[in-house]
Image (cartoon, rainbow, N blue to C red):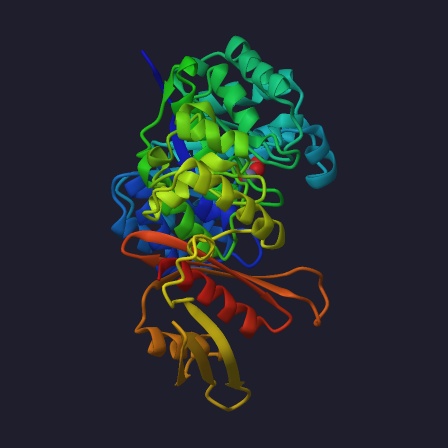
């Protein structure tokens, strides 16, 4: 029998604390609906004492989201708990989460107090919260750096006071997996009543160990993991939902299961990234752009023989249609043949060898070889070279309405269009859409600067959605409007 591990999502609380990631109420509800569909057990929706807006958002969210438990955070202070109670008044299933530190470093330098006084404050908070909710979670902040004997005493008292979940945070991301696992084991062996409650963990990623520590805790009896989507959160972030869940699914030898519908992971990741404006790093496990993209010749060859050679998960299981074989100078003949086949070219071994030599020359010059490049390599230009930018002229500034004129070579024919937009990029894209009769929806748009100067090269990444498929476009230029237009055309050329 597998052990059920509860997934407590704190994207809307610990994740939303990140500067620049604040969400409005509508966006929070959008994320919460997605988390609900994903199957998370508990949604930590905010820290109500922190602002009236946060309190109101929890109220609004609780009216719409009724399946998962809605949790509100409070320090071990009456006013905080009162605010949590107010925020949860419409919640169908509610949890009050109260916390105070248990490490000597926090007790001494942050609270300027003593272990005894802090413990008393924590216990009083649990008792007070218990007057308003049956479901009360107690967190011993910085438990990762706390003395195990004191932590055990504290947790035991919190359970006696009525806590139904006890959370052991590695607040500073300091612990090593073995050490953190041993801490959980120690608590199971030394805390009376611990088998009556859910033991939770909440790990931060300062040393890149948040997920590893969470899994070590599960191996030692923890039954709730606190996570955020894409691992967003304070500093280096929190344990990422997708990593924790997919580890438990993939490693059946852990004998643990969650309620998560993993096929919805990718869509949720995209939504959170877009709304919080935090791009997901390309090599992020599970949800990064390259998580299922194979580029070395040996790996591509292995994948084509059997996916299991280089993939421990099926991309479909996380909601990604298929793995991809990226054509670069490292690719071998088997990947080239695969893509030629896909485009409808059935080639002999001799033709493949010839094309491969030309492909290598091109791939050395151009990092990423697309379908259009392959068609040209096959001598099949068919008179069409896709969309080529001949001119971009933009008028913008205050108080002007941005306007762009774009001249494109479309299959060798020149077409011009002028359009307005909310900004110069929007106006340019609208002009292109007028020419190509809007082919795709813009799913993601990301501008990155390489250095920090105002004369920097801007890199633009976009994702276009067309008939359920995603097409990636890239452009770089010192002018971000030009870089954006190049990225848009790059994406459109792939789908056209
Ligand atoms: O990191 C932490 O300790 C927290 C607590 C409030 C649980 O976020
Ligand atoms: Zn935290």
Asked where in the image residue 422 lies, by quadrant, the reply is bottom left
Residue 296 percent location from the top left of the image: 55, 35
Residue 362 percent location from the top left of the image: 57, 52
Say if residue 69 shows up in the picture.
Answer: yes
Q: Closer to the camera, 340 or 494? A: 340
Q: Closer to the camera, 102 or 183? A: 183
Residue 464 percent location from the top left of the image: 39, 59
Where is ligand 2, by quadrant? top right
Q: Is residue 338 left or right of residue 146?
A: left
* Residue at the extreme front: 350
- Report the residue at 38% width, 24% height from top: 249
Residue 236 percent location from the top left of the image: 61, 42
Q: Quadrant of the N terminus?
A: top left
- Report the residue at 47% width, 72% height from top: 388
Asked where in the image residue 495 lies, by quadrant, the reply is bottom left
Compared to 317, does 382 lie above or below?
A: below
- Report the residue at 55% width, 59% height from top: 20
């Amino acid at each position: 029998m597998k052990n059920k591990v509860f997934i407590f999502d704190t994207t809307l609380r610990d994740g939303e604390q990140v500067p620049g990631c604040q969400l409005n109420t509508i966006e929070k509800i959008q994320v919460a609906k997605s988390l609900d569909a994903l199957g998370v057990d508990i949604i930590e929706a905010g820290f109500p004492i922190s602002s009236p807006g946060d309190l109101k958002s929890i109220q609004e969210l609780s009216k719409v989201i009724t399946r998962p438990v809605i949790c509100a955070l409070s320090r071990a202070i009456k006013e905080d708990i009162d605010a949590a109670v107010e925020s949860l008044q419409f919640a169908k299933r509610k949890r009050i989460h109260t916390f105070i530190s248990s490490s000597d470093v926090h007790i001494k330098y942050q609270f300027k107090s003593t272990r005894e006084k802090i413990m008393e404050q924590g216990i009083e908070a649990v008792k007070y919260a218990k007057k308003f909710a049956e479901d009360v979670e107690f967190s011993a902040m910085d438990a990762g750096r706390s003395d195990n004997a004191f932590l055990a005493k504290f947790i035991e008292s919190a359970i006696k006071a009525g806590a139904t979940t006890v959370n052991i945070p590695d607040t500073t991301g300091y612990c090593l997996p073995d050490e953190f696992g041993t801490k959980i084991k120690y608590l199971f062996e030394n805390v009376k009543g611990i088998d009556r409650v859910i033991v939770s963990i909440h790990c931060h990623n300062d040393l890149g160990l948040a997920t590893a520590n969470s899994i070590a805790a599960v191996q030692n009896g923890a039954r709730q993991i606190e996570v955020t989507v894409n691992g967003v959160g304070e500093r280096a972030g929190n344990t990422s939902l997708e990593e924790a869940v997919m580890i438990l699914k993939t490693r059946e030898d852990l004998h643990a299961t969650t309620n998560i519908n993993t096929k919805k992971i990718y869509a949720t990741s995209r939504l959170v990234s877009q709304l919080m404006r935090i791009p997901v790093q390309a090599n992020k496990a599970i949800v990064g752009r390259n998580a299922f993209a194979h580029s070395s010749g040996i790996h591509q060859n292995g994948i084509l023989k059997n996916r299991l050679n280089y993939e421990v998960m099926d991309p479909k299981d996380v909601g990604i249609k298929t793995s991809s074989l990226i054509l670069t100078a490292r690719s071998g003949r088997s990947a080239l043949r695969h893509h030629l086949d896909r485009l409808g070219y059935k080639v002999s071994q001799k033709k493949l060898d010839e094309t491969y030599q030309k492909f290598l020359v091109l791939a050395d010059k151009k990092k990423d070889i697309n379908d259009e490049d392959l068609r040209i390599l096959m001598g099949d230009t068919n008179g069409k070279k896709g969309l080529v930018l001949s001119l971009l002229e933009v008028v913008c500034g205050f108080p002007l309405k941005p306007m762009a004129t774009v001249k494109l070579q479309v299959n060798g024919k020149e077409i011009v269009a002028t359009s307005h937009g909310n900004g110069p990029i929007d106006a340019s894209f609208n002009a292109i859409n007028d020419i190509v009769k809007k082919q795709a929806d813009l799913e993601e748009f990301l501008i990155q600067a390489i250095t920090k100067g105002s004369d920097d090269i801007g890199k633009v990444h976009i994702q276009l959605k067309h008939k359920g498929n995603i097409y990636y476009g890239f452009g770089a230029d010192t002018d971000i409007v030009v870089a954006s237009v190049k990225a848009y055309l790059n994406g459109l050329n792939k789908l056209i």
